Image (tube, rainbow, N blue to C red):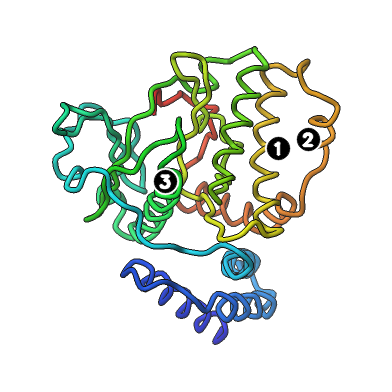
Amino acid sequence: MGLAVLGLVIWLRQELAREAGRGGGAELASGALLAGAALGVEPVPGADAAGHLLLGLAGVQLLRFSGEREHRRAPRAIRGGADAFRPSEVLKRDLFGRIELGEVPTPDGPLRAVRRDFRAGALWLRPVAALLARREARALGWLADVERVPRLLDRGRGRFLRSYVDGRPLADAGPREPAYFAEARRLLRRIHAQGVTHNDTHKVHNWLVTPDGRPALVDFQIAGRHAARTRWFRLCALEDVRHLLKHKRTFCADALTARERALLARRSWIARGWLATVKPVYVLVTRRLLHWRDREGRGRPLGPR
């Protein structure tokens, strides 16, 4: 128990330091402490979930140590835009906050934008929502020169503003042409070239089809930012591609090459580790405790993002 408390304290101090712009550190120390605590969990009812959670947190810290690094705060394209934003439609509302579509005034005229307001969520989940918003803002800062991903406009005071990406959800559009998926792979290459892995390409509603039939990618809340092309980076990038190929298999399976089929059949240790450790905790927290189910694109699409 003492190891778990110490590891969590170090982890929380890191997150507060990052929020204050002072950088992180001590990933190896906190990761090792959390892993030790997880292995020492007593075999009592409910302890399995606690052990999985501690292992998941330990994994995050150790993976940060192995290659993922923070960087300076991402620049804001429109300072004060989150306050000046005029909402016109609520796209989504849940325990983590509210996502709104609207406009923000600029010298060149109104600009369509999407605002995530995590102050509208449950009070006890605001730290988690703030962490996810901060991760997305930093990832978008690294991708400022990549087309067909959202652009960071503003953030602060419990809100996060990004540009609007016009397009239909992949599940709605259902592209049957292999050209769409070939272009989607090229988009992933450009994202990976900036040191970013999306880590959530398996969700079909994160992929959009633009009015000219090209792919766009949204929702970078759990994206990874990597300082170097380490083995961990290459594994995450490969998982991005593998999950994209799952969508290709759904919409135009006949166009899969032999190499792509082989990649689909080979599940990495990341995927196996997720299913064995993090996924049980995720299901427990979201479905049993929060009574919330992430439909991963199988429910009603949210429309353009």
Residue at mark 1:
242
The numbered dot on residue 140 is: 3
Query: Which amino acid does the dot numbered 3 rest on?
Result: Leu
Residue at 52 percent across and 64 percent down: it is 69
**Label 2 crowding class (10 Å Cα cut-off): few <14, some 14-19, many 20+?**
some
Q: Residue at x 80, y 37 (%)?
A: 263
From this viewpoint, which residue is outermost toward the bottom? Answer: 2
- Quadrant for the C terminus in the image: top left
Q: Earlier in the sequence, mark 3 or mark 1?
A: 3
Q: Is residue 187 above or below residue 173?
A: below
Q: Secondary structure at mark 3?
A: helix
Q: Which residue is mark 2?
A: 264
Q: Are marks 3 and 1 in contact (CB under 8 Å)?
A: no
Q: Which mark is residue 119?
A: none
Q: Are marks 2 and 3 in contact (CB under 8 Å)?
A: no
- Disc 2 from disc 1: Cα separation: 6 Å
Q: Quadrant of residue 230?
A: bottom right
> Tag 1's secondary structure?
helix
Mark closest to the chain's N terminus, 2 or 3: 3
Of the pair 180 and 284, the residue shown nearer to us? 180
In the picture, measured across the screen, residue 111 lies left or right of residue 202, that is left
- Verify CB contact (< 8 Å) between mark 2 and mark 1: yes
Q: Report x, y in % for residue 285.
A: 51, 54
